[in-house]
Amino acid sequence: MIERLKGNQNPNLLLLHYDLKQLSVINLLVIPKYFFIPEIIRERKPLSPTARRAGWIGCKIAICGVPSAGRISLIKDRIIEPREDVLAKWRAVRFLKEQQDVRAKGWILSVMQCIEKIKKRTFKIEELYQFEDELRTAHPLNRYIKEKIRQKLQVLRDNGYLDFVGRGTYRLVNWNPE
């Protein structure tokens, strides 16, 4: 699974929530393939020796590791999302497709998740620095957390995900408080 993620042949993930009694779709969500990084893959225990495929090791995908910007609704609460909205959300994160370095992409996604935890469209870099310990735990090989945060904010700014307002203040371009 990890090798597949490192390549460019992994598929997008569609998540379907449906009502079996009414044979209707309640929610349909797509997670673009470039949101899948090794950190969200959780290894399962090997199958028991008595299982038909004894010793086989599967995995789980920790969807909680995907920022909300990477969870694009096609149908939400039985209502089809407008095509323009879906495409705008897809375009807003498409820059991640070009990010080949898995570690760098992991950092970008981590910073995106921290920004979402602030729960404001406009935020200050000091608010993001409050996640320094969390980011240090997620990325233990990096000793320069604040510098990395600033670097990834520049990447997000350069790719139109957020705007630099001035004096350590940023604003999300496509903010959807959910």
Image (tube, grey):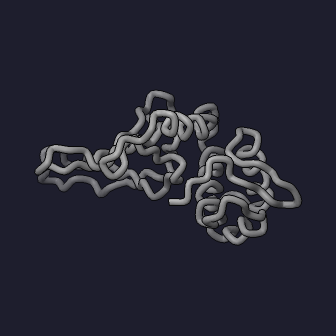
Q: Nearer the viewer, residue 81 or 91?
A: 81
Is 112 placed left or right of 159 in the picture? left
In the rendered image, residue 79, in percent from the top left (x then y), is placed at 34, 46
Q: Quadrant of the N terminus?
A: top left
Q: Nearer the viewer, residue 155 or 176?
A: 176
Q: Nearer the viewer, residue 161 or 10?
A: 161
The residue under the point 62% across, 47% down is 174
Is 6 placed left or right of 74 in the picture? right
Above or below, 126 against 93 in this view is below
The residue under the point 50% across, 31% down is 7
In the rendered image, residue 37, in percent from the top left (x then y), is placed at 51, 45
Above or below, 177 against 9 in this view is below
**What is the quadrant of residue 132 in the picture?**
bottom right
In the rendered image, residue 4, in percent from the top left (x then y), is placed at 44, 35
Is 163 placed left or right of 37 in the picture? right
Examine the rendering and report whether any part of residue 170 can be seen.
yes
The residue under the point 74% across, 51% down is 153
Examine the rendering and report whether any part of residue 58 can be seen.
no
Q: How many marks?
A: 0
The residue under the point 67% across, 68% down is 131
In the picture as drawn, the residue positioned furthest to the top comes out as: 9
Q: Nearer the viewer, residue 137 or 110?
A: 110
**What is the quadrant of residue 92 in the picture?**
top right
In the picture as drawn, the residue positioned furthest to the right comes out as: 167
Is 57 placed left or right of 175 in the picture? left
